[in-house]
Image (cartoon, grey):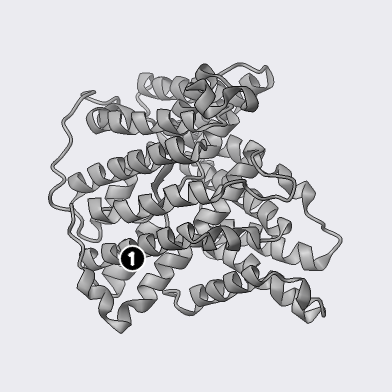
Amino acid sequence: MRRYFDFERHGTSYRKETLAGITTFLTMAYIIIVNPAILEAAGIPKGPSMVATILSAAFGTALMGLYARRPFAVAPYMGENAFIAFTVVKVMGYSWQAALAAVFVAGVLFTLLTVLKVRSWLAEALPQTLKFSFAVGIGLFLAFIGLNETGIVQSGGPGAPVSLGNLAKAPALLALLCLFGIVLLTIRRVPGAIVIGVLATTFLSFLLKVTPAPERWVSLPPDLRPTLLQLDLPAILNPRFFPVVLTVFVMAFVDTVGTLIGLSARAGLLDGEGNLPDIEKPMLADALSTTVAPLLGTTTTGAFIESAAGIEEGGRTGFTSLVVAALFLLALFLSPLLTAVPPHAYGAVLIVIGSFMIAPVTRIDFRDPMELIPAFLTISLISFTYNIGVGMTAGIISYPLLKVLSGRGREVPKGLWVLAVLSLSFYVFYPYR
């Protein structure tokens, strides 16, 4: 096993990888509850949806570990689930069965494009400036999510979209305690700093009755049959359904490429040219997972940005992913306990990880407007629109556009033009409110 994952080359160990897997799982376990709650708005039964969420995450993460050998956890994407539930079903009026069919088609297309190495060709066409800005943007986005989850930052009123939260409230105070506790342990190089911080904050929250402790630890999983293989494939033959398929495809494609590159940059897995070696493998794991997810009864899956937490704990190989996959399967029976981690605990972790991920900003050439503006649009719009896809597509469109306007259009790789056209279609078909 050590040889298979090449622990020596990555300077890691079973202990370090296991700790990293636990850390990643604790920071993303919320998806077990949140994803079914969002999809319930589309009419998808909550119990079966939870089982589908867990099984799709376990399948994709195990495949990422065994085949791609990368420390990336896979789970249903936040954002895509809301798009399916609130836009495709609630606003456009399609059934959730038809919406899942769109996800399935996107997964099949991803698989074909990955096998044909088209996705890796497109990913390698991205300039280093955009790759660095993806990592920075994701880092700030994680921090912004964490600040909201902990109550340190809250929604503001007219003229002020966000404002300072009530720091006198117990959740915010516990979050700050967790935040600085993790930072202090990290400075002192204490192994498992993030896990210690999350668990200590969780149990302290139970003790102070800020968060209700679970009444039971073990429960049998609900029946999956109400969502299993319930796709409405004939619905996708309707020409009016094309924008849905295209939007799902572009959102998932951009999210996956940006997340993989951003996480790999933090883990030191990129080569000298800023590319991820054998990127087809994690992409194929992602594509197959997206194909399986709608068959089970959930939406688009992909590499989760919360994998950064495990990477920060030293996770560098697929063994980290196997630990996460095993914990997801365990969650089928221990979901009351494992989902009891409060937002002010895992939210504090996201703030810490976000701060660590902004380091690549120093590698962006701020003196060149053609490099600066696309990077700025990417980084700022990821957070300010609360949508990774919006920020990434803005950068992908603006980069070649500025090159052409400055008379340097020949420097733009063909693959980047393809990505720019796909990104432009994202805005053409985007369901604006």
Q: Is residue 273 left or right of residue 24?
A: right
Residue 268 versus residue 428: which sits nearer the camera? 268
x and y percentages locating residue 337 in the rendered image: 29, 26
At x 54% / y 34%, what residue is drawn? 309
Q: Residue furthest right?
A: 367
x and y percentages locating residue 52 in the rendered image: 25, 46
Name the residue beneath numbered marker 1. Answer: 105
x and y percentages locating residue 392 in the rendered image: 59, 62
x and y percentages locating residue 98 in the rendered image: 24, 68
Q: Residues within 10 Å of mark 1 (few under 14, many from 20)?
A: many
Q: Is residue 67 left or right of residue 365?
A: left
When the figure is inspected, residue 24 is found, relative to residue 372, above or below; the finding is above
Residue 248 versus residue 109: which sits nearer the camera? 109
At x 54% / y 31%, what residue is drawn? 317
At x 60% / y 49%, what residue is drawn? 261
When the figure is inspected, residue 213 is found, relative to residue 393, above or below; the finding is above
